[in-house]
Image (tube, rainbow, N blue to C red):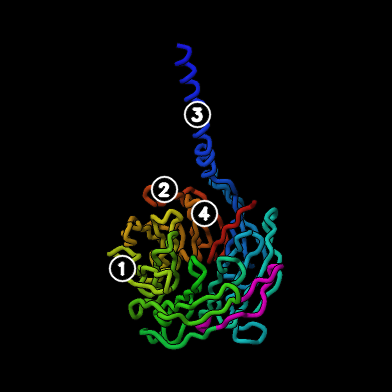
């Protein structure tokens, strides 16, 4: 009898010992950080620049927004992985007497949330509307909408931006004589493996593919040189799945998502589906804006400015999309939105109603439910989360 008790005790000890790593792993999946949420805006009579608020994912609580830095039209933001630096485009068409916008580099004080300007450089084109970093955080990439150009800038050791290491002028036109009479670069982003850079050009109905050199920050036209969407679609933004197999392109002019399979060896994009981001019975304006893939790779979200909604899609094993729901964003003209890193919350910025609405994401279905958290921020356009630790 005693031996049985000893055996049982030993088995219990072994179970507890072996399960300890799994218990720690389960604990590690809980939110560890609170976040600074930076908001890029269009400046004017009300907005003064970049704002921020704090967000605690454990409680879903937010703080009152504050001004982080005064700067002109910081319409798109990108933070480096270390959380030390934030980069913003200044969406203007005249910078220091040149037909160009600017890119600003800021240092982040994660205690106060305030930003300090490090330097500002020409974006090498008018109307810059998108900024991103390569996977090593050594280069900043910028898309200039008005002039249809893209450029790359090295990040110096102190976070400042150096002289452009690459510059490309897009050429040609699209099917729409009014909106596509010339190139309009709307996004540039490196691929997950840091080997290519893809630029979505609304004016050309193309995704231009470049070979990206992470050592020198140069761009060279790839072969194949581009992927295409239907004429008059107006590709705006795109997003990769976490496994890099698929790329989803949001088309502003027809409010649709076109799905591509991505060949990581050649950089080629192979189209296999197009689906509307709007309900079938919607007859209003088609002005799709932002697209984000859930960290799980199971869901995709796209904003519709015409309907003032977020479209929620399920992503199948084959990469195909199916609509789950359309959720009104609680404001007017939802432009930019983002998810927290855990994929538990979605922050929708409503540009014309001057507010940000926080939604909780159902992890099983991807559906959205408003948390009741609504923040007043003038002309919100883009959002970027930075961990406080």
Residue 76 appears in the rendering: no
Residue highlighted by disc 1: 273
Question: According to the image, label 2 marks what residue?
Answer: 363
Q: Residue furthest top?
A: 1
For residue 51, which numbered disc appears in the image?
A: none
Picture residue at 53% right of the left edge, 79% below the top: 219
Q: What's the residue at 42%, 67% (across, down)?
A: 305
Q: Earlier in the sequence, mark 3 or mark 4?
A: 3
Of marks 4 and 1, the one in the foreground:
1
Image quadrant holding the N terminus, namely top left
Q: Establish if 69 lies above or below 10.
A: below
Q: What is the magenta range?
A: 146-167
Pointer 3 with pointer 1, Cβ within 8 A: no
Instruction: Identify the residue under disc 4.
Output: 340
For disc 3, the marked residue is 14
Task: Tell me the chief SS of the magenta region.
Answer: loop
Does the stretch in magenta take in 201? no
Provide residue 208's location: percent of width, then percent of height. Answer: 44, 79
Near mark 3 (Cα within 10 A), the count class, few <14, some 14-19 or many ≥20, is few
Cα distance between the residues tagged 3 and 1: 51 Å
The residue that appears at 66% across and 61% down in the rendered structure is: 84
Left or right: residue 192 versus residue 309 is right
């Amino acid at each position: 009898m005693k031996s049985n008790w000893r055996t049982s005790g030993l088995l219990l000890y072994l179970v507890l010992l072996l399960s300890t790593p799994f218990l720690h792993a389960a604990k590690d999946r809980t939110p560890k950080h609170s976040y600074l949420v930076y908001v890029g805006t269009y400046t004017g009579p009300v907005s003064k620049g970049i704002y921020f608020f704090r967000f605690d994912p454990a409680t879903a609580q937010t703080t009152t927004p504050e001004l982080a830095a005064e700067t002109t039209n910081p319409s798109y933001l990108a933070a480096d992985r270390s959380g030390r630096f934030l980069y913003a485009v200044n969406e203007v068409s005249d910078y220091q007497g040149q037909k160009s916008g600017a890119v600003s580099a800021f240092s982040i004080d994660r205690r106060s949330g305030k930003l300090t300007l490090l330097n500002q450089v020409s974006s090498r084109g008018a109307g810059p509307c998108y900024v991103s970093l390569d996977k090593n955080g050594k280069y900043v990439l910028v898309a200039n909408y008005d002039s249809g150009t893209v450029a790359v800038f090295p990040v110096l050791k102190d976070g400042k931006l150096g002289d452009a290491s690459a510059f490309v002028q897009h050429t040609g036109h699209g099917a729409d004589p009014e909106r596509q009479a010339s190139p309009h670069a709307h996004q540039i982003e490196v691929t997950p493996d840091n080997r290519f850079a893809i630029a979505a050009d609304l004016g050309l109905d193309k995704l231009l593919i470049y070979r990206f050199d992470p050592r020198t920050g140069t761009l060279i036209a790839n072969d194949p040189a581009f992927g295409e969407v239907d004429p008059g679609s107006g590709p705006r933004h795109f997003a990769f799945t976490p496994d890099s197999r698929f790329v989803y392109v949001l088309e502003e002019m027809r409010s649709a998502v076109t799905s591509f399979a991505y060949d990581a060896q050649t950089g080629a994009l192979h189209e296999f589906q197009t689906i509307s981001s709007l309900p079938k019975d919607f007859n209003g304006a088609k002005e799709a804006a932002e697209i984000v893939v859930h960290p799980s790779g199971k869901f995709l979200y796209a904003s519709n400015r015409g309907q003032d909604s977020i479209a929620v899609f399920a992503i199948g094993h084959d990469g195909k999309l199916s609509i789950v729901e359309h959720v009104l964003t609680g404001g007017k003209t939802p432009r930019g939105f983002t998810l927290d890193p855990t994929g538990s919350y979605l922050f929708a910025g409503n540009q014309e109603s001057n507010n940000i609405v926080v939604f909780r994401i159902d992890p099983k279905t991807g559906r959205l439910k408003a948390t009741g958290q609504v923040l007043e921020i003038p002309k919100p356009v883009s959002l970027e989360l930075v961990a406080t630790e």
